[in-house]
Amino acid sequence: MCGKSWLMALTVGVVTVVAACTPSSTDSPGTTQDTGRSARPSEAGVATGPDVTVPDAYTPVLVSVLGQPTFPFLGTDGKYHVAYDLELTNASHVPATLQKVEIVDGANPSRVVATFDKTVLAAKDPSACKEADCGVLRTLAFGGRVSNTEIAPNASLMMFVTFSFDSLDQAPKVVLHRVSLLGANSPAPGNPVPVTELVTPYNIAAGTPMVLAPPVRGRNWLALNGCCEPYFVHVTAANAFNGQLVNSQRFAIDWKRLNDRGQFFEGDRTKNESYVDYGAPIFAVADGTVEAVFDELEPNDPGVLPADDPVKRQSLNMHTGDGNYIVLKLGNGVYANYAHLQKGTLKVKPGDKVKKGDVIALLGNTGNSSASHLHLHLMDGPSPLASNGLPYVIDSFEYVGQMNMAAFDAADDYLELPAGMTFLPTNPGAPQPRKNQLPQANAIVNFPER
């Protein structure tokens, strides 16, 4: 769900990666299942699986993971990425001020996989995170930035976690979370003191990403708002649905096309038909069954995000925010959501079977959208917003390079540039063939005409 305000040019801190063991499959949707995990008391604490133990301790901050176990996926930077969200709740009588959160190898907690210190968790001036390594700690509602790392008594914040490995054999099977803070060290009244918790085992070896065919075809497709840093709006789109926090858009991409001059439109910028991608065919990314369709909304005028308009926002809700959409059931608990489609072009109905590569609709500008584009994400349930997002990769494409962010910062609400500027990379080389990777945020790619 997008507009010029989709993109926030921030960066998250670089994390340290260390060698560990090779991931294996367990119980993520679309993967082989293993029901051998268990939890049982032990003298050292709680054993949660082979070689992973959580020590018994008073822990003032409760740490829980949103969604199911996950797995690494290969990005266009050549690294294997892991991304998930934490909810941190201060269950004590005094404020808890986070000093550092470390992701550690569950089988060897002395081995640190990633470190997020206070400067990465938050910033005194949240607006400074536009160009700084900060901002992974957010409010529960709409991922609002926080200016410090304090969690009030009986309050909660979210933490958007991402880290990467140079190779799969560096990734542990299970991680633990070491939280260093100033807070309560017992249930009894007292002043904040240094506390360190080792908590919340999380399986990051729960299979492999589903391999998809491209949802669009042709040259110069831009992966707007893609994974995984929390300065892009999809990554921080967690919200409260059906009695729980979910983040369906964690791995979503807004696909928008450029012409060969690096512009989004030609001619009258106030007309949808002027935009290069408007009306482009949309393809099934895998064999599947149509779970749901919605085909009632008229196109928006370019340049205005309905959520920012006092009148238009009244018509937005969890059923209309994605505009006209199609949900495909891909099997093994995996669903694909296609959003913002052009009214009257949906070629399928619930129950229809589709094959990979079938044309299912045309690209549009409906719902909470200020310009034509295709929003696509995978999820672990049929609800476009009330399911958790799943990582995936695309089978084949050419990597052109990264969008010129200076141009994007200079663009207006119609994505029009000052004369002489282009969204294309400033020093592009020859397009690089890629297989089984997820295009990362602001990557420009060519998809084959199959």
Image (spheres, rainbow, N blue to C red):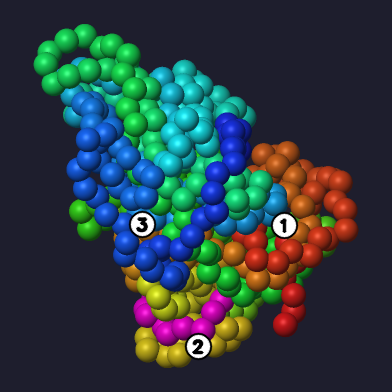
Mark 1 Cα shell of 10 Å, populated few (<14), some (14-19), many (≥20): many
Residue 293 inside the magenta-drawn segment: yes
**Residue under label 2:** 354
Q: Position of residue 238 (x, y in %)?
A: 37, 48
Decide whether residue 201 is among the magenta residues: no
Q: How many marks?
A: 3
Choose the circle earlier in sequence order: 1 or 3: 3
Residue type at mark 3 is Gln
Q: Is tag 1's residue or tag 2's residue first in the polypeptide sequence? A: 2
Q: Please, which residue is most extreme toward the bottom here?
A: 352
User: Which of the labelled discs sits on residue 68, or is there none?
Assistant: 3
Residue indicated by mark 1: 444
Res. 86 in view: yes
Do the numbered discs 2 and 3 sit on residues whose CB atoms are within 8 Å?
no
Question: Magenta segment, which residues?
Answer: 285-295
Residue at left offset 79%, top offset 57% = 400
Residue 408 falls in image quadrant:
top right
| Mark 3 crowdedness (10 Å alpha carbons): few <14, some 14-19, many ≥20 | some
- Residue drawn at (73%, 39%) of the image: 406
Asked if disc 1 and disc 3 are in contact, CB closer than 8 Å, the reply is: no
Residue under the image location 33 percent in, 50 percent down? 49
**Which residue, as the protein is rendered here, is positioned at the far left?**
188
Tag 2: residue type?
Val
